[in-house]
Image (cartoon, rainbow, N blue to C red):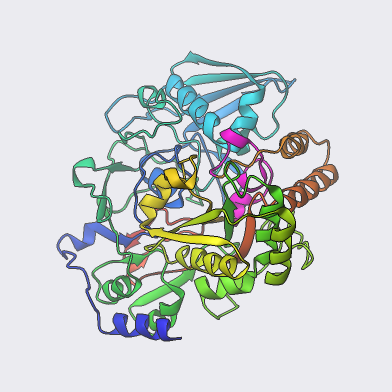
Amino acid sequence: MRRRDLFAAGAALAVAAPAVAQNSRATTLRMAPQANLSVLDPVFTTATVTGNHGFYVFDTLYGVDAQLRPTPQMAEGHEVSADGLTWRIRLREGLRFHDGEPVRAVDCIASIRRWCAREPFGQLLARVAEEWIAADDRTMVIRLRRPFPLMLDALAKPDAASPFIMPARLAATDPSRAVTEMVGSGPYRFIASEFNSGSRVVYEKFDGYVPRQEAPTWTSGAKVAHFRRIEWHILPDPATAAAALQAGEIDWWERPHPDLQQLLARSRDIRREVTDPTGRMAVLRMNNLQPPFDDVRVRRAVRLSVAQDEYMRASRGDDTRDWSVGRSLWPRHTPYFEDLGAEVMPGDLDRARAALREAGYAGQKVVVINPTDFPDIGPLGQVTADRLKRAGMNVELSESDWGTVVQRRANREPTDRGGWSILHTTGGASAWANPATSFLVRGQGANGWFGWWKSDRAEELAEAWLNAPDEGRQRALASELGRHALDEAAFVPLGQFVIRTAFRRDITGILPGSSPYPWNVRRG
């Protein structure tokens, strides 16, 4: 309780409120994002803040509506051959990149192929793609070895790691290296000259963007930019962000700290909304490449130690209306969720100690990398460090800013050479709803998500799910895959929560969805 009282007092006194200029207020939106933007390339990383940035700058061939149904976005439409082996996708007229160049089919092909090299859903597509052809500047053709029934779902994948379209010259960048030049065809241009990681990110309206005519919904429809300029002000201290929002120095705080929600609720000038009722899931990931977590028995011992309610109370507070627990790698409110019960995740430190002894754990150092400037994630790492120490592990809590965590998690070396053992993250429940879109259950090893769990069985089940003949068979395969991944502690679920975003009352047009997209938002 002392920590929450401190937050509230700091906000009430407007301690250290940033000096954000008030000129050009009518045409500028000022936002405090969830975290610092340290990596710009939304294909290179799955960090949600980078994905949000990606939707400002880039566009996608297809988007999704509020029911997650794929709809054309950059695409005018498509044709599919009777045997399902040939897809022809036609681009809309008038698409241009921010450098003035037209968007061509070769750009789309290069972008999607680079995305396929990194993203689990894309990797499934790449396995069956035989040929990518630019029939003309506005027509791309994908020829398949066998039908891929979720083609549009892949091209419309929402949230972080979407198949963003960039110029072919940038998409030619090795997928293992991040693109740093931000040239897209989306509604806003990235202003590189004003970018200061850890402080500010600036976008300006792209006048060459031609919105669709349909109503905006989630990642599809008319992406109309009403503000000439959007500024992200990086405010990692919750009290500072709350004070800035109360004073009107920022217009929108993407993720207010739970301890400050009631303070914001008392302000007549601030509105709060849950824009995504399905919420986000928090997870723990272990590095499968290095000891001790290259041993599945040690990973299982960690899973036995996890008490989800302790993680959720540390991260989200005591109000259980905003969070829930569930022992499954399929999130609640998604089709395949099934709670696998206390036997799988009892939150029992005694059982965890016994499992570590049985596994022959020999006191190897466990390095938990953890952000100090990301309130959604930071408490998770602190709980893990405490519980594993109590379970008898040799734990080092290595805390830094979020940007450093994002950089360090790519290091595959041992801990004494800058590597890591455990990290935590969160993701939108809708993005983790099935075997194609969720990296939580995919066992791609070196080609997979940080932590690099390898399981041929998991990949077989994912592929079988993709080609299953009916919904019943899909459900059975997803159940087996979810159980297998949790049994091997590919990830460990820590709980699920909703976010109440907060904004000044004169800001309107914020759309339902999993992320703070800028289109349709206006003042007054």
Q: Quadrant of residue 102?
A: top left
Span colored in magenta: 429-450
Q: Nearer the viewer, residue 266 or 36?
A: 36
Q: Is residue 359 above or below residue 212?
A: below
Q: Residue furthest front?
A: 362
From where the camera sits, is residue 335 visible?
A: no
Say whether residue 514 is left or right of residue 243. right
* Place of residue 482 in the rendered image (x, y in percent of width and height, measured from the top left): 74, 50
Observer-nearest of 313 and 105: 313
User: x, y percentage for residue 244?
Assistant: 26, 72
| Residue 31 screen position, x and y as percent | 31, 61
Is 117 located above or below residue 338 in the figure? Answer: above
Depicted 453 relative to depicted 23: above or below: above
Across the whole image, how many numbered discs are drawn on residues? Answer: 0
Q: Is residue 79 left or right of residue 28?
A: right
Q: Residue at horizontal 48%, vertical 68%?
A: 379
Is 440 magenta? The answer is yes
Q: Nearer the viewer, residue 509 or 438?
A: 438
Confirm whether the magenta stretch covers residue 380: no
Q: Residue at x 62, y 43 (%)?
A: 437
Screen quadrant of the C terminus: bottom left
Residue 381 visible in this rendered orientation of the protein: yes
The reply, left or right, for residue 193 in relation to residue 360 is: left
Percent x, y for residue 20?
Answer: 19, 65
Instruction: Say if 399 sits above or below 139 in the image.
Output: below
